[in-house]
Image (cartoon, grey):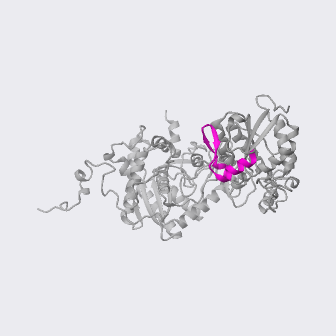
Amino acid sequence: MKSPYDSLPQEAYWRTGVVGKTAQTIQGLYRKKFPITRATRIATAGSCFAQHIGRHLRAANFSVIDTEPAPPGLATEIAAKFGYGMYSARYSNIYTARQLLQIAQEASGTFSPADAAWRRDGRYFDALRPAVEPNGLSTADSVREHRAHHLRQVLSVIRSAELFVFTLGLTEAWTHAPSGTVYPTAPGTIAGNYDPAVHRFHNFTFQEIYSDLSAFFELAKAQNPDMRFLLTVSPVPLTATASGEHVLSATTYSKSVLRAVAGQLHHERQDVDYFPSYEIITGSLSRAEYFESNLRSVRPEGVEVVMRTFFSEHGISSDLPNGPSDSKESSDTSKEKSREDVICEDILLDAFAR
Amino acid sequence: MTRICVIGNSHLAALKLGWDAIKPEFSGIDLTFFGSAGAHIRELTVADGLLITTDRVLLRSMQDLSGGLSQIDPGCYDRFLVCGMEFSVSQVMRVAAKFRPESHARDNRHPISDECFRLSVIGCLRESLMIQTVEKLRQITDKPIAALPTPMRSDEDQRPVLRHIQTNGDDEKIAAAFTDAARHVATEFNVRLFLQPGDTLANCLQTKAVYRQGSVRLRAGLNVESAQGDYRHMNKAYGELVLRSILSGWDTDGRKLQFA
């Protein structure tokens, strides 16, 4: 009797592919679709987990694009509070595929956001990246001017990147209902005021996210035909959900949809690869060991395993001497530091938890 | 007798010449100079409670200036004065060359908030050779330390960037940014800050040419005139005026320096 499962490799079976393995020893979880070298010009964007990826790529001397470098004299942690050194431009975290499409369209001149300058305590904030100026700017006009400069850099990123790494973070977002503008944070969290008549919660569907990412790919390739894409899904659970579901169910739904979209695009397109950082951190073989005690933040050890898996598949020594932390520090100190140095706006929602 | 150890880079020359001229007026004070041109002062290291160096250029220069001393022993001095060493309005210009704070005139530079600009300038001053030297001093002594920034360039300097800053009206903002950041860093490192005396300034960013003319290089003998077009180094008259200002204004714990 013959079975189609007869000749499958060990990794195709749970018992031989997963049982008894760890995130460090599991084989064949990631097989690159195309090579990535230190010379590849890489752009990074996405939810806060993407900051880890960008930093480790830089620390390993990959050619990560930075079109908006920090002014001199700013220590790394202060620069990050102003949105510097996080991604290839100063766009801060991009949690949803719609946000990514939106900024690419805005940089290309085909989209104009509504209600783009939020207020707090007499200061003005860029509603599309409210965290990049912790205390805002003095006028809405300044916000527009700073944003116009930023968008020129975004366009430069799209035109120059050979690989665009995007980490999908959320399906839930807050929108300006009349225009459809999607914000990275709920109005009233960092700045702005929540107006139920104007602002609407939206939980993006598979089809919407698939369409948004596909549209982004086409828009980017119209500027840069040779660009390729690497998708990952953030393993970081939702801080809070406005969906009406329990946050655990909402997280499972959200991550499942994102993972499914990434999988679909990976299967359909030769120019899209998928890297399973989500599986490494959240998979049952890791027994949640890579999460901090809040079961949300990813421990530095988890990030290291993720990046070693990536580097190994691309032929880069996994014996990397230095992560993004200062190698002079003790490992305990540096790990403690890297726990704290990821900027996540959505953590502010914790302040609303009763 | 109050013994003051003066540490600096090439800008020490004006102070040394000035001190030699006014020394008789301050018979209760003794100044000993240590330093070297350029960034050689970076090679000072802390060892056994002393500041020492193995850098031959710095060692030679220290010996020349101090009258033969090859190390800085904090026990031999009551106060310390650190001069120049990149603690300069040039640090503000360095940031402003590429980044435009919100309150400055609009142009094509990267726009940043005034807050980000301020933190950037503070960071640049914190990284300066002067503050690195202060940090070394603080490892070996808790005696009073005063800081004298690098002098503003002479108003003979007609660089386009200066003209541009003056034309667009940002010159006072640049100067104020430096003063604010310098005060912040001085407080942070428990250093008494002496800004350049107003009498020496032609405008908020430049020194009167009269204090540049005839300046000399920091070399043994201090008798080689600065190169033509060197608008950064000041002369003996500047050294006299600045040191008078410092020595008459430097009180600690409510006590002024005693001139005997």
Please provide percent x and percent y for residue A129: 58, 51
Please provide percent x and percent y for residue A244: 44, 41
The magenta segment: B39-66
Any part of residue A80 in sight: yes
B251 drawn magenta: no
Q: Is residue A86 left or right of residue B51?
A: left
Question: Foreground: A257 or A344?
Answer: A344
- Taking the view exactly as shown, the residue that stands out farthest to the top is B254
Please provide percent x and percent y for residue A197: 57, 46
Q: Is residue A251 left or right of residue A155?
A: left
Answer above or below: position of A337 versus A166.
above
Any part of residue A110 in sight: no
**Which of the 4 quarters of the picture holds residue B52?**
top right
- Taking the view exactly as shown, the residue that stands out farthest to the left is A1
B44 drawn magenta: yes
**Which of the 4 quarters of the picture holds residue B226?**
bottom right
Q: Is residue A105 left or right of residue B40?
A: left
